[in-house]
């Protein structure tokens, strides 16, 4: 009896074989893509004379930002630092964590830009693209924060925060006119901290520089140093 006949007689063996055929190539492909990105980031940082760390101890709870304080099993990977923007120290990294429960239970990976300013600049708020679910919620009287005098900004972005008056006041006409959130990203701010991140997805090496520049441009606008 050959190996194929043995597997055929054992349903669990068939399942195992099929799983191996599917899973092993997928794992290998994921490893290859991660390795290629890691090498690119390391070379990029070296060329720009920036600091690159493949993995560092998790140390982001002190930011007070929700994205870095929910869940468990945190990992901080591929951190590039030594960058300044609009008076802030900036780092870019991949962040992995497990959600504790609810609808979003599971492991998540994202790429983030984290800005630490020298003083408190921001009321606590989050910002993302407006979606269909937000429009449905509005039908039932659940609204986000509206910025007076800028209907286009309000249609494009979903803005939320506990102190609605402070958040609305922060978004001056000058900021709403110049601001652009990087594609497929979310933003969270509180005190001296600002994070812009690609939620539930990482940025590959082909789009990394674009993400960096767009994140820095958005942060500069919020810090009052955006383009004229």
Image (cartoon, rainbow, N blue to C red):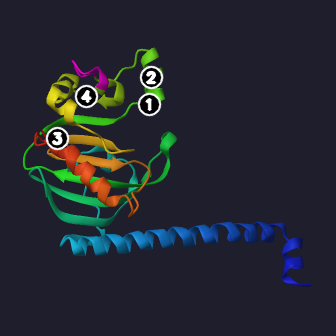
Mark 2 or 3, which is nearer the eye?
3
The answer to whether mark 3 and mark 1 are in CB contact below 8 A is no
Which dot marks residue 135?
2
Instruction: Please give the residue where the numbered disc 4 appears in the rendered image.
Output: 162
Residue sitting farthest toward the right: 1
Q: Secondary structure at mark 4?
A: loop
- Dot 2 or dot 3: first in sequence order is 2
Mark 3 or 4, which is nearer the eye?
3
Q: Which quarter of the figure has residue 44?
A: bottom left
Marks 3 and 4, how far apart at CA: 22 Å
Residue sitting farthest toward the front: 228
Measured from the top left, where is residue 118 in percent x and y? Answer: 7, 50
Q: Secondary structure at mark 1?
A: loop
In percent of the image, x 44 and y 22: which residue is there? 135
- Dot 3 or dot 4: first in sequence order is 4
Instruction: Please give the residue where the numbered disc 1 appears in the rendered image.
Output: 131
Which dot marks residue 16?
none
The answer to whether mark 1 and mark 2 are in CB contact below 8 A is yes
Which dot marks residue 221?
3
In percent of the image, x 23 and y 75: which residue is there? 46
In percent of the image, x 50 and y 47: which residue is there? 105
The answer to whether mark 1 and mark 4 are in CB contact below 8 A is no
Mark 1 or 4, which is nearer the eye?
1
Q: Is residue 149 magenta?
A: yes
Q: Which quarter of the figure has residue 150?
A: top left
Of 1 and 183, which appears nearest the observer? 183
Measured from the top left, where is residue 204 in percent x and y? Answer: 41, 61
Mark 2 or 4, which is nearer the eye?
2
Q: In the image, which residues are magenta? A: 146-152
Quarter of the picture containing the C terminus is top left
């Amino acid at each position: 009896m050959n190996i194929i006949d043995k597997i055929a007689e054992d349903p669990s063996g068939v399942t195992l074989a099929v799983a191996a055929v599917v899973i092993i190539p997928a794992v290998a492909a994921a490893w290859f893509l991660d390795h290629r990105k890691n090498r690119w980031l390391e070379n990029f940082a070296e060329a720009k004379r920036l600091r690159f760390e493949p993995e560092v101890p998790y140390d982001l709870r002190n930011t007070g930002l929700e994205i870095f304080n929910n869940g468990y099993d945190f990992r901080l990977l591929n951190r590039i630092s030594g960058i300044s923007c609009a008076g802030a120290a900036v780092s870019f990294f991949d962040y992995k964590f497990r959600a504790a429960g609810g609808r979003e239970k599971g492991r998540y990976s994202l790429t983030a830009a984290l800005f630490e300013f020298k003083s408190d600049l921001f009321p606590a708020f989050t910002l993302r693209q407006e979606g269909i679910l937000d429009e449905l919620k509005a039908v039932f009287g659940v609204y986000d924060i509206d910025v007076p005098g800028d209907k286009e900004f309000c249609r494009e972005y979903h803005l939320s925060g506990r102190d609605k008056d402070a958040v609305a006041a922060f978004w001056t006409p000058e900021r709403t006119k110049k601001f652009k959130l990087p594609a497929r990203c979310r933003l969270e701010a509180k005190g001296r901290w600002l994070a812009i991140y690609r939620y539930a997805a990482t940025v590959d090496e082909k789009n990394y520089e674009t993400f960096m520049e767009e994140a820095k441009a958005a942060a500069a606008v919020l810090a009052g140093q955006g383009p004229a």
